[in-house]
Image (tube, rainbow, N blue to C red):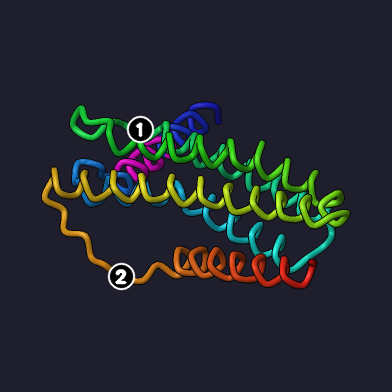
Amino acid sequence: MKKHLHLLSFVVCLCLATTLTQAQDLTNPGNYMTAIGNAQQEMNQKYMAYVSAAAHSKKARKIDKMRQQALESIDKSRMKTVDIPFYKGDNSLRQSSIDYMKICYSVFNEDYSRIINMEDIAEQSFDEMEAFILLQEKTSEKLREASEKMNTANKTFAAKYNVTLVEGSDELGDKLNESGKLNHYTNQVYLVFFK
């Protein structure tokens, strides 16, 4: 019985190793870029869920819980990226992705926490509301700049390894961009009415 159990364990481990090796063919630069992008996917989805909740809900606990979930997903995504090996000795894309996630983690951990704490006192005066909205916009700008650096790193890596990037529509990216524009417009209109 023990002999069969050991044999079964060996076969299962062999199958898992073979499956993981085939699923992670990172010798192709396009597959490598895809692996880096896939590591960020959950993080981006949690980020979008947080932005949506913050824009549509006034329940601070719900929003803070979603912020905590976003922090966890950023950390998971960073760990997935750390596990991806260098591409032929080149760490530039992998490191850019890790740097991007560190900035996202910092923003969600510190900046969004300050925004949540400022929200209650922002209602007390125009100056405090203006400072609150300015903090939100500066935070969004940090994320936008980090995203642009990541996009530049992707383009540089693609050019270096002759990967043709297809300009297409990224549904999640489009939603994030639209949400940023909408929030900026809403904040400007809100300030006029708050006065």
Residue 13, located in which quarter of the rendered image? Answer: top left
97 w.r.t. 192: above or below: above
Q: Residue at x 65, y 48 (%)?
A: 135
Name the chief secondary structure element in magenta: helix
Q: Nearer the viewer, residue 192 or 158?
A: 192
> Disc 1 to disc 2, how far (Cα)?
25 Å
Left or right, 39 with respect to 124, comes to left
The answer to if 15 sits in the magenta stretch is: yes
Local crowd size for mark 1, using a 10 Å CA cut-off: few (<14), some (14–19), many (≥20): some
Report x, y in % for residue 3: 49, 27
In the picture, the quarter occupied by the C terminus is: bottom right
Question: Residue 168 shows which numbered tag?
Answer: 2
Label located before the other in sequence (1 or 2): 1
The kind of residue on which mark 2 rests is Gly
Toward the viewer: 163 or 23? 163
Q: What's the magenta region?
A: 12-21
The residue tagged with tag 1: helix, strand or loop?
Answer: helix
Q: Secondary structure at mark 2?
A: loop
Residue bearing mark 1: 95
